[in-house]
Image (cartoon, helix red, strand yellow):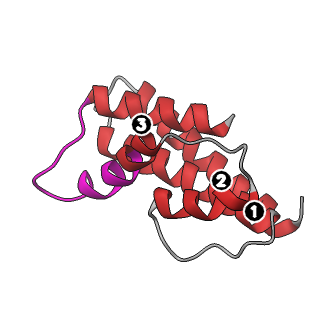
Amino acid sequence: MNGTVKEWVTKAEGDFATAGRELGTTNGPNFDAVCFHAQQCVEKLMKALLIHLAVPPPRTHDLQALAKLLAPVRPDWSGRAEDLRFLTRASVEFRYPGEQAGQAEAQQAYEIAAQLRE
């Protein structure tokens, strides 16, 4: 693993740890932040894999777009389209007024990220 890939993975793991801490707190958890950091974890891991496979990742937060780039070079990679859509939507929409994540959405985002980390 080269240094750039390792740095992406390290940052992804930091996002996953942050999402887990926030989800586990009993004193005013920020479920919006759980969704954001879960998506960021997956995005960074996908970009790390693309770099590792010599595919320059674009500047995007759209996980489905990243999955389309992974498909031809890593056909065994699997991320369900609905899970990727959920994470992408949750990370953006819950950051702004008018939308708010609840515990169920935060738990779902965290579980998707945990599954895709494997």
Question: Would residue 40 be counted in the magenta stretch?
Answer: no
- Split into 4 quadrants, where in the image is the C terminus? top right
Q: Secondary structure at mark 1?
A: helix
Residue 82 percent location from the top left of the image:
39, 41
Q: Nearer the viewer, residue 56 or 30?
A: 56
Q: Amino acid at mark 2?
A: Leu
Q: Which residue is label 1 attached to?
A: 7
Q: Is residue 83 above or below residue 54?
A: above
The answer to the question of whether label 3 and label 2 lie on touching residues, with beta carbons closer than 8 A, is no
Give me the disc on residue 109. Answer: 3
Q: Amino acid at mark 3?
A: Ala
Residue 107 percent location from the top left of the image:
39, 28
Q: Nearer the viewer, residue 2 or 78?
A: 78
Q: Secondary structure at mark 2?
A: helix
Q: Which tag, 3 or 2, sits closer to the chain's start? A: 2
> How crowded is the residue under tag 2: few (<14 C-alpha within 10 Å), some, or many (20+)?
many
Give me the disc on residue 45. Answer: 2
Residue at point 58%, 39% (across, down): 17
The magenta region covers 87-102
Q: Which tag, 2 or 1, sits closer to the chain's start? A: 1
